[in-house]
Amino acid sequence: MEKQIHPTHLPRRKRSARLSLAMMGASAFGLTACTQPAEDEHLTDVRFDEPKSYQGVEECVAANVYTRSACEDAYEASLESVPRFDTLEACEAEHGEGACAAPTDEQAQAAGGGSWFMPAMMGYMVGNMLANTSRGRSFERVYQEPVYRNRQNQGNWNAAASQASQRVNQRNEALRSSVVQNRQATTRRGLGTRSASWGS
Amino acid sequence: MLRINVSERPQWKTLAKELGFHFHTIDGEPYWKEDAYYQFTLEQIEQEIEAPTEALHEMCMALVDKVCHSNALMQRLAIPEHMWDIIHHSWRSGQPPLYGRMDFAYSGNGPAKLLELNYDTPTSLYEAGFFQWVWLEQAIEQGILPRHADQYNSIQERLLNAMAHLGDRLENRTLYFSCVKGSDEERATVSYLQDIALQAGLQAPFIYIEDIGIAPGVEHFVDLDDHPITALFKLYPWEEMAVEAFGEAVTQLNTHWFEPPWKAVLSNKGILPLLWEEYEGHPNLLPAYFEKNSHSPLEAGWVRKPFFSREGSNISLITPSGQQESVGGPYTDNPWIRQAYHPLPRFGDKHALIGSWVVGDRACGMGIREDVGRITKDTSCFIPHAIL
C-alpha cells in the first residue's frame, strides 16, 4: 500500500520539472520593444515658451493657441497638481481662511471622484516645451500649472497667476539644469568601444 | 554517446519566434538543428560530465585563490597591474559568480578532456537552458522520443535560485543587465537572463555597455538618467574593460559586477597551463604550456590558442598525422598557449563539442555544438541532447 503512494523506484531526473519565461514570449516581447526608446533615450536640451494663463477651458479654447483637447487635458493635469487636504481646517491652515473649498462636481468628475478640500482653483497656466533627445528626436510637449487662491494672493487673479508663473519657472529651471548637467557632466562611451561580439 | 536522426517538431520555427529565439538561423544558415540529437546514458552524464565538471570547478577555484595571492601569477596571465587589487579584493570578499561553461572533448569512451573555460562571458545559454528543454518536453509529447527520455538540464532552475539568492543581497533588489550594441544573439542572451531575474523577483533594467556613464561625485557608474548602477551583469569581457577609457574607473567605483573581477583569472587561456602545472596528469586535463617563442612552428599534435579569444578565433592546430586547420580573427596582440591536441568525436562529417554549465558552484546542464571543422566556431550548430 505504502509503496504505491511513495514508489521506491522514483526515476532519477536530470532535468527541471517546469520552466517559464516572464517577458521573452511573443506578447511580452512586443512590450519590451515599446519601452526600449525610453530606456535608451534622454533629453539633451530643452526650451520653454512663455506660459499663458486662462481662467477656464473655454477661455483657453477661445485664445486659439491650443486645441480643445489640449486645453482640457492641461486643465485636468493642473487640477491633479492642486494640493489636496482631508479637511477644510487643514487646507485653511495652510492656504488662509476662505481660500479653500471642496471641488465642484465638474472638478471631482475630472479628477476621477473622491472627496477632499483644496485651495479654490481660479484658472490655469499652459505653455509649450520643446526638447531634443540623445537619439536626435525632438518633441513638443504641453506643460501646465494650476492658478489657485491662497494667503498671499488673497484671490487676486493677477497675483495668483504671477505665483503660478513663478512655480512654473522654478520647475522648468530645475528640468533645464538637470538636462544641462546630464549633457555636460556625465561621460559615456568609456566601455564597449571595440566593436565586436563578446559571447563565447 | 550516439547521434540519432529524428524528425523535427513540425512547428518549431513558429514556436522559436514566439519564444524570443530569433537567432535560430544566422545569416541564412541554421544554428539550431533538431533533425538529430545526441544520446547519452545516465552513467555517462553523471560520472563523465557532471562529476568531472564539479571537480574541475573546485580545482579552478583553488587556482583562483592562488593567483589572487601571487603577483607573479597575475603577471604570467598578462593581467594589467591596475586590475590586481580589484581582482584580489573581489575574491577575498567572496563576490559571488553567476555562471560559467566548460568545453569538453568527450566521445562517450574515456575521460572528458577540458579544452577551455568560458567563465566570464559564456553564451548559448538560452538554447541550452530553455529551448533545448522545451524540445525534449515536446519531443516526448509528440512521440518523437519515448516517455522515459530525460535531459541533463536544470540550468534555468539553478539560475533562478541563484538570482533569488542574490536578490536579497542587492540594493533595492536591482541588477542592471548589459551587452554591447549590434549583436542580436548577445542581446537575446541578456534578455533571457533578465527574464530569469524578473521571475526571481529582481528589478532588471537594461543598459547598453556603451551608454554606461561616469558622473562627477557619484560613487557608482550611472545609467542614462544618471541614476547609480549599484550592480551590473555585463556580457562583456574583463580584459577589454581593463584597457578601455573607463578601465581605471572600474577599479575605483563601487558598482558590483557579475561576473566578478576575479573571473578575469579564469577567462584567460593562460589558466590552462597553470591548471596543468598544478594538477599535471589529471585525467580531465590536457597538457598545456605557455608559448615561449611564438615564431617557433607548431608541432604535430598541438593546438595554439591566444590568451583571449572567443568562438574559436585565432586558433590553429596540427593533428598527430599532420593535418592542419586554423581560424582567423582579431586576437593577435596577446600571448599564446599550446595545448595537446585531443580530437573531438566525429559523427559522420560532424565534430561534436560538449559545453558543460556551472551555475554558482553546481554543474547543472549541457549543450552540444557541432561543426564540420575541428575548431568550434560561432557558426557551429546547436544540437539538443537526451538521456536514454
Image: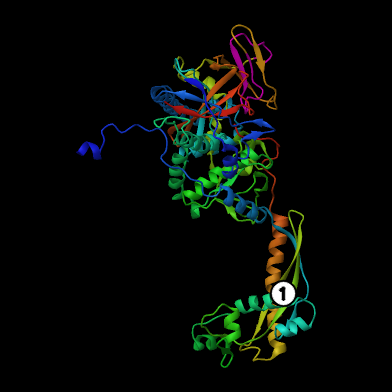
Q: Is residue B295 magenta?
A: yes
Q: Is residue B131 left or right of residue A188?
A: left
Quickly name the residue at label 1: A70
Residue B31 at least partly seen: yes
Circle 1: element type: helix
Q: Chain of mark 1?
A: A
Residue projecting furthest to the top? B321
Vertical order, B278 against B86 (above or below): above
Amino acid type for the residue under numbered disc 1 = Ala
Secondary structure mostly seen in magenta is: loop
Residue at x 54%, y 30% (from the top left corner)? B265
The magenta stretch spans residue B97:
no
What range is drawn magenta here? B293-317
B58 or A186, nearer to the observer: B58
User: Does B112 sit left or right of A125 as displayed?
Assistant: left
Depth check: give the residue in front, B21 or A85. B21
Residue B124, given in percent of the width and then of the height, sits at 56, 34
Mark 1 neighbour class, 10 Å CA radius: few under 14, some 14 to 19, many 20 or more = some
Residue in front for this viewpoint, B332 or A16: A16
Number of numbered labels in the structure image:
1
Instruction: Give coordinates of residue B336: x percent, y percent.
Output: 63, 20
